[in-house]
Image (cartoon, rainbow, N blue to C red):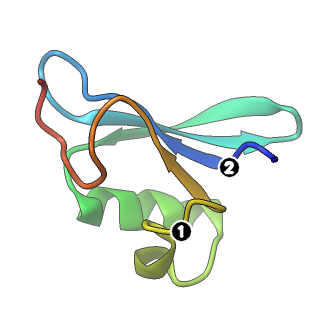
Amino acid sequence: MATPPITIHAPTPSGGRPVTVHINSHDEKLGMADSDQDLVVFLADAGPANQELILDNPSAVQWQGAAAHRYESA
């Protein structure tokens, strides 16, 4: 199974989740997301269509270290 191209990493101790996209065999940082709205903006800049719809599509987005759509630290 291929690695999803967009990864929302575990929340940082101060809250927020780093977001990366896998392009040309390396990960590029898109930013720190504090909400789904932040993700929509990052994904719009990265190019995928229907940003809101792909947040729950495991073939496009991988949520790591915490439940999807949760941004506070554990």
Q: Amino acid at mark 1?
A: Asn
Tell me what residue is drawn at x 69 percent, y 31 percent: 27
**10 Å neighbourhood of mark 1: few (<14), some, or many (≥20)?**
few
**Which residue is farthest top?**
13
Tell me what residue is drawn at x 39 percent, y 64 percent: 41
Query: Residue tagged by mark 2?
Result: 4
Above or below, 8 against 68 in this view is above
Q: Percent position (x, y) of residue 72?
A: 11, 35
Q: What is the quadrant of residue 15 in the picture? A: top left
Mark 1 and mark 2 residues within 8 Å of each other at the beta carbon? no
Provide the secondary structure element on which disc 2 rests. Answer: loop
Q: Percent position (x, y) of residue 24?
A: 88, 40
21 lies left or right of 38:
right
Judge by depth and name the residue closer to the eye, 31 or 10: 10
Tell me what residue is drawn at x 69 percent, y 49 percent: 5
Tell me what residue is drawn at x 73 percent, y 42 percent: 3
Q: What is the quadrant of residue 18 in the picture? A: top left
